Amino acid sequence: MVCPEQLPPSGIRVIIVGAGIGGLACAIECKNKGHNVVVLEKFPKLEILGDIISFGPNAGRIIERWGNGVVADRLRPVTLIHTGSRWKRYDGVDITTMPTYGLKFGSPAYNGHRGEFHEIFFNFATEIGVEIRLGQRVDEYWEEEDKGGVIVNGQRMEADLVVGADGVRSKARKLVLGYEDKPRSSGYAVWRTWFTSEELAKDPLTAWMTKDNTHTGWFGPDVHFLAASLKGGKDISWVCTHEDKADIEESWSFPGKIEDVLKVVGDWDPVVQTLVKKTPPEKLVDWKLVYRDPLPTWISKGGRTCLLGDAAHPFLPTSIQGASQAMEDGVVLAACLHAAGKDRIPLAVRCYERIRYERCRRAQRLGETNRDTWHKADYTKVLEKDRAEGMKLPTPPWLFSHDAETNAYQIFPEVSKNILEGKYGFQEIGYQTGICERKVDPVSRGV
Ligand SMILES: Cc1cc2nc3c(=O)[nH]c(=O)nc-3n(C[C@H](O)[C@H](O)[C@H](O)COP(=O)(O)OP(=O)(O)OC[C@H]3O[C@@H](n4cnc5c(N)ncnc54)[C@H](O)[C@@H]3O)c2cc1C
């Protein structure tokens, strides 16, 4: 399948390490911009991994362009479409409701199973001609003056640019930073699960969730519990974020234990208790939330290697933006390469970092502020009108209305000029944003 928006060949060779959401988005965007792209992924085959993941309207805008809506059409049947979220106190008393975004920000949000979404992106990438090599664990990154490369399975590969989209435990980071940095515990962990709802359908406390798509949150001191029923109520996913000071070293995802969850929410709303007790134990994951201090840079000194997605900036789930920002990275990088051309790769990469860094940082901070709003609320007063309003998720237009591609092309000339004139110091990174005013067709894209 040839993508209608594919541009003529740019001659730019790009190696992307990691076929996660960020790596695939970057690959699709690079292919569409005419770059010659190869993706190296350590997994030997495509697997449906993970559970619930969210793509905000800012990512929805990117998704909708792929294949002129083909990818959006494929996502829609597996997307959580519901009428709104209900927020409750830990004991089940209603706090507030939140409507869905609809097309308020110009494009819909997409929430669903990470593995199912990932499979759709993966298949689309291969259909438009992206070369994805599985079973390729990159052991080393290297860089010379006019090229970058990797060592994979003993073989040396080279390109004009290497993109480390290799996740929260990125190896590319060492070449970029010049030192090893380790993730640290965020002080929180998430129990998370996804399972089919037959057992919940039999229980009067939870049967309502199994009849339609629903989204409900329960909030208490330093804990929150979000549950969704999807695919018309056939599938259930819940996540419970709680304090966890464990020293995580390099391992961060373990099998979870139902009894541990009940130690935290065992006296909450009986609906929550039932959800937990009826969770198949083998489906429960204990996901330690690792964090890293913002990296001083995402690009190597020579500008032939750069970081993207979680490798550059791990997000807390409470930002609800990790995957969306990884996607925006891919869009902006591919556009900067296109705008700069093959002879100016290091400039393109510096522009990519400059355009992305502060916006991403701002989105990252939302993870902390959202979590603190929920976890530090005064639950004796949270039902008061103003306080209940304050529990809603913020929906900032600077975040959701952003059109990463249009913005990147618009500001590239100014950003590149400033870089060339030395107006930016190495660490001084200008914040740029752009709000997209775009005509939408709510009928064809009624998510
Ligand atoms: C298996 C898995 C399950 C996940 N489940 C969820 C979830 O349920 N909900 C959620 O919100 N987020 C989940 N995430 C995280 C989420 O996908 C990311 O936070 C976000 O999408 C940003 O993606 P990324 O591409 O930057 O990183 P990632 O999604 O982490 O992708 C990195 C990719 O790089 C590959 N890789 C790493 N090292 C190498 C190497 N040396 N050589 C070759 N390939 C390498 C990895 O196998 C992986 O495919 C999951 C990630 C993974 C990898």
Image: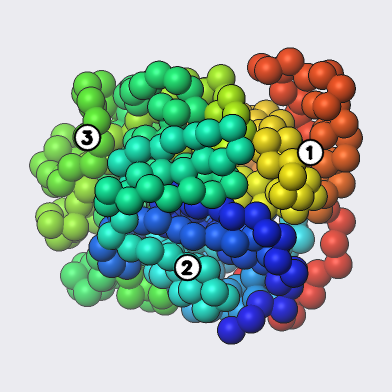
The answer to whether 392 is drawn above or below residue 250 in the figure is below
Viewed as shown, does residue 359 lie left or right of 420? left
Looking at the figure, which quarter contains the C terminus? bottom right
Q: Amino acid at mark 3?
A: Ser
Q: Residue at x 76, y 61 (%)?
A: 106
Which sits earlier in the primary sequence, circle 3 or circle 2? 2
- Give the residue number, with chain letter if any, for mark 1: 433
Helix, strand or loop at disc 3? loop
Q: Residue 9 falls in which quadrant of the image?
A: bottom right
Identified at 28% across, 60% down, the residue is 135
Of labels 3 and 1, earlier in sequence is: 3
Residue toward you, 385 or 63? 63
Q: Mark 3 highlights which residue?
A: 251
Is ligand 1 less than 8 Å from the beta carbon at label 2? no
Type of amino acid under label 2:
Glu
Q: Mark 3 to mark 1: distance in Å?
A: 36 Å
Q: Which residue is mark 2?
A: 131
The amino acid type found where label 1 is placed reads: Thr
